[in-house]
Image (cartoon, coloured by chain):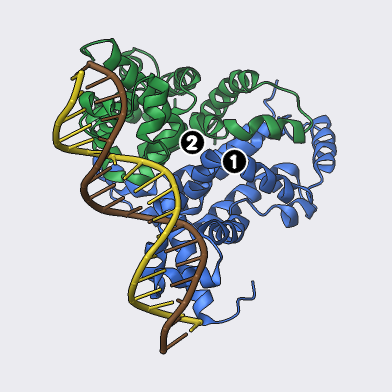
Chain colours: A green, B blue, C brown, D yellow
Amino acid sequence: MELHDDTEQRIFNAAQRLFLQKGLSETTMQDIADLAGISRTSLHYYFRSKDRLFEKSLNNLIRNIMPRIDSTLAKDISLRDKIVEIATSYIEQLRGNELLPGFLIMELRRDPQEIIRFVFSEWTTIDFQSIKNQMDREVEAGLIRRFDISQMVITIMGLCTFPFICEPILSDVFKALGGHQTFDNFITERKNIVNQMLSLWLTPSEK
Amino acid sequence: MELHDDTEQRIFNAAQRLFLQKGLSETTMQDIADLAGISRTSLHYYFRSKDRLFEKSLNNLIRNIMPRIDSTLAKDISLRDKIVEIATSYIEQLRGNELLPGFLIMELRRDPQEIIRFVFSEWTTIDFQSIKNQMDREVEAGLIRRFDISQMVITIMGLCTFPFICEPILSDVFKALGGHQTFDNFITERKNIVNQMLSLWLTPSEK
DNA sequence: GTCTATATTGTGATAGAC
DNA sequence: GTCTATCACAATATAGAC
């Protein structure tokens, strides 16, 4: 991301923030111009159209949306430990990007193909075969329960992202349920729960 | 829902379907008129404005969005069995309403207050105190692990809704991961997984 | 590079003929 | 009730002065 000058960067930051919060169609060029402190028409000088500006924002935002798993998968630890580490570090990753999961889902509804293309480009570096091999070995050795990778991906994403998706209403839910936690505490506790749930589930049942 | 005549019903159905698919701002009165087979201006005769039409659609759609839990909670079974039954029957409930979870999340981003009001109106019938009492008794008896109700709600919603949210891209994911399942099989299998995960997690660890 | 002025289109809404 | 004609307005985008 080498942007030519300061103004261009300011516009880009403003656009990203607004798209992230409100999505494409609810964000107007006027909104972006106001936040960037520039006149509406000048946006077109830097970015030809709203669509091009959005596309650039999307490409930048979407990079933080998937769990970073390569380094964990490369470690020499059990598959169960890898999965738990992926999930908990994903929660940590989302902590600084609370709005990303909701944004992803809005995009997924608006243009599923766009998301598919991105997800696949992320997955080219992942060696699924070696995951399956490790699974075979550890199932054989009675260390882990066999699982379907698609289901695992959906499970992890659901467990980790859903609190962030619900963040706008969570503080009211806490009140209703008699609790008095902060969102931050909730997320910290969440890491433990996800850790436990995945560990227990992946442990093979003793016959 | 007693609607005056057939045309009004047709409009209402068209509007609901489009709002569900594309959300409020991406749906135009023209879209609705086309799908209902009527001229654009005639919509205003039946429903004063787009906002009123959307509000009526929302009130109707949102009723199927939360798990139906009252009858399960009233049963004379263990708390663990109640939770598992709530989750699995929720998945079954969503089967006929695949688009609802995504719609809920779009709404939640557009107008969180609206969703909060609705969730609370749904929860007035729930006796949280009796859940807590049952939990106390069963924790005492070593039958269940103590859990936080907010976390449980988020866990169940995340596990159950996320496959439906991802439905538009799931068939491509199956291909990429070498699987060849249908979405329907995936959901059936999902019920087992959610059942297992919740059961295992709620079982107290033996010391 | 940045602005003012303007073109163009799409959308929600109303008035009035039939 | 349903349509045609029209209004009002907001939003993207372009042209051209400076």
Residue, disc 1: B156
Q: Secondary structure at mark 2?
A: helix
Name which residue type carries label 1: Ile
Q: Write the residue at 47% across / 17% down.
A: A96
Name which residue type carries label 2: Gly
Position of residue B140 relative to residue B118, above or below, is above
Q: Nearer the viewer, residue B186 or A46?
A: A46
Query: Is residue B104 visible in the rendered structure shown here?
Result: yes
In which chain is the residue bearing label 2?
A
| Quadrant occupied by the C terminus of chain B | top right
* Both marks 1 and 2 on one chain: no
Label 2 crowd (10 A; few <14 / some 14-19 / many >=20):
many
Q: Write the residue at 35% across / 49% down.
A: B168
Position of residue B172 relative to residue B29, above or below, is above
Position of residue A42 relative to residue B123, above or below, is above
Q: Write the residue at 50% across / 53% down.
A: B100
Residue, disc 2: A158
Coordinates of residue A151 in the picture (x, y in percent): 41, 40
In the visual, does B139 lie left or right of B207?
Answer: right
Label 1 crowd (10 A; few <14 / some 14-19 / many >=20):
many
Q: Secondary structure at mark 1?
A: helix
**Which residue ends up furthest to the top in the rendered image?**
A6
